[in-house]
Image (cartoon, grey):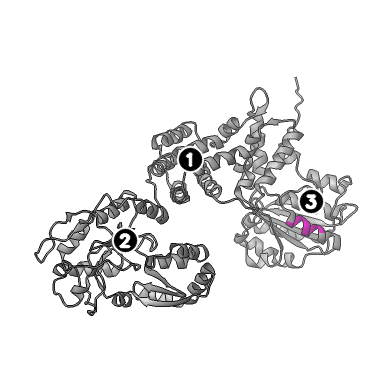
Amino acid sequence: MAESLTTHLVLARKWRPERFSELVGQEHVTRTLSEALKRGRIAHAFLFTGIRGVGKTTAARILARCLNCEKGPTAEPCGQCAACVEIRGGRSLDVSEIDGATYRKIEDARAIIENLSYRPARDRFKIYIIDEAHQLTDSAFNALLKTLEEPPPHVKFILATTEPQKMPETILSRLQRYDFRRIPYATILERLKDLARREGLEADETALRLLAREAGGSMRDAERMLETAMATASASGKVTEAEVASSLGVASRTTVLKLADAILEKNAAGALAHVRELKSRGANLESLGRDLLETFRNLAVAKLPASDADSPLDDIPDHEVSELKRLAAGASSRDIMRLFRLMADSQEQILRSPYPDLLLEMAVVRMASLAAVIDADELLRAIGSTPASGTPPASSGGGSGSRGAAKPEPAPSPQSSGARRLRVEGEVKADAPLRSESHDDGPRELPELRDFIRGRRAALAGFMEQGAGLVLDGDLLTVIARNDIYTRYLNDNKAVISELASEHLGRAIRVELSANGAANSAAGRSTIPLASNGLTRELPSAAAAGASNPVVAEQAPKKPAPSRPIESIREFAPASPATEAARRAATPEERQAVLADPSVRRVFDTLDARLVELRMPNSAEASAKESK
């Protein structure tokens, strides 16, 4: 018994656009071609380039109908005349579609050239559409050179290719080129919704979003995957996200967000379990890595303040945006950036490796096992909030000429001698030193001014925090540079500092630059390096006056220390009329005594505990090597 079977057309062919207005995502091309048709400025040869499935061949067929329509040439073909109907069905004698991958030899090019002398059978133009034109051989291209440059007036060429770089430059120079772009995600989603409505298909929006995302900018791929989803729909006829993810071999958005949540929660075992479950279900691991990378990008965007500019989150459903913001609220921007960088590096290796599953599993475990980092501001707040009264500073040894083990003594009062201020060079800001219980009314490090400069000139503020002290006396702001490198930079920015200080304080401020050595000399004290860790100490003025042993000189009576900005961890004594002592390397006993100071020890313990790497100046490292 003969069976009558209805021929089924896939969505890409059934709903193929028939006018330029129906071709979505390529408005820059359709607008130009429409204007050229309206004004009669029609080229003799066209080149349509772009990735697969973005409408190159469809646009070529529409252009052929526009040229051969009985009412044409026109930008709006009627669609009813014989030419329009035959071109749409691929049966027109005057429009030839040639597969460049099959008819690629010089003999095929010569056959085209021989037929050019014949007039069209019925229509206005004889049109040749050559698809995948880059597949033609060099000899075939050479044979077409003259023809493409000066074809007969009744002949038009339309070449379509995904790889124009493989075509000879001599051919490209003879064609009017149009670049077809990747179709935006939102446009593909709207097209899929329209097709589902035309087909009477009930589909979850999350399922259509997954299809649009996996299409990668290709409308034909999106329509093909929708066709597959319709064929594998549940018994109820509804297309769900889970079924689409299973048919495509990808992870659903819910699963990817759960994986990202496990990584941010430092749950390495849970994250590994998610990956292995997806692997057991046959998910594409390269696609999973890309989705995870995109999720970290979205988390970084979710940390940014809201703005009117276009955002990657605009194309994401509201419930997914809410989940992203919830995950982002529990992580710092620095941690999210680290995770993105690690996933990006891992994805490159996954795409090249024969063992993508192992690489992805270890990448996920590594990201979930990363220790959190802390930025400088948070570290300073943590150090500055540590109480200093409970850990008294260490005292110098007995009457011997060298320092022994440090002995604790009660915390000094504001009137006691040997008042100390501690400071760490490098990462610690100049406006947050560790201080003892002593108080004075002298000039401070001007934290408000530093914060104001940081808000206007972040780079300058960071440079000043590392290498410049600030002293304000009336309308004179003295900037004390730590070394020659900072001196040169700060000298170049004196005018900027003066302008910002004047704006902040509301009056004209004059800025003077002082080198670290000059500032110490003016205060009547000198500094010596203690160790390669970047610590320095200030010699008392008695030692500067000529005492050969600075430890013995420290035992002399001391006056309360003047309040001045200090650029490193140092001990200081009151100024004296004696001249400044020459800088020298500290002895191992002196270094050991300072490092045994509980206040100093607390600084380094805090740094070690928060996993912050201290980068010390080269000069300090050099002095440490000399002392050894």
Check if residue 475 falls in the magenta segment: no
Q: Nearer the viewer, mark 1 or mark 3?
A: 1
Cβ–Cβ below 8 Å for labels 1 and 3?
A: no
Rendering coords of residue 302 (x, y %): 55, 47
* Gap between marks 2 and 1 measured at Cα: 37 Å
The 10 Å Cα crowd at callout 2, few under 14, some 14 to 19, many 20 or more, is many
Residue at image position (24%, 76%) is 576
Rendering coords of residue 383 (x, y %): 35, 53
User: Label for residue 55?
Assistant: none
The mark that comes first in sequence, 2 or 1, is 1
Q: Which of marks 2 and 3 is in front?
A: 2
| Left or right placement of residue 101 versus residue 534 in this view | right
Is the N terminus in the top left, top right, bottom left or bottom right quadrant?
Answer: top right
Q: Please name whichever residue, 562 or 42, is drawn nearer the observer in this view of the structure.
A: 562
Helix, strand, or loop for circle 3?
helix
The segment highlighted magenta reads 28-34
* Gap between marks 1 and 3 measured at Cα: 42 Å
Q: What residue type is labelled 2?
A: Val
Question: Can residue 523 be seen in the rendering of this structure?
Answer: yes
Which residue matches tag 3? Answer: 20
Which residue matches tag 1? Answer: 260
116 versus 335 height, above or below: below
Residue at image position (19%, 73%) is 542
Which is the main secondary structure of the residues drawn in magenta? helix
Quadrant of residue 524 within the rendered picture = bottom left
Q: Which amino acid does label 3 sit on?
A: Phe
Question: Can residue 91 be seen in the rendering of this structure?
Answer: no
Rendering coords of residue 527 (x, y %): 25, 71
User: Label for residue 424?
Assistant: 2
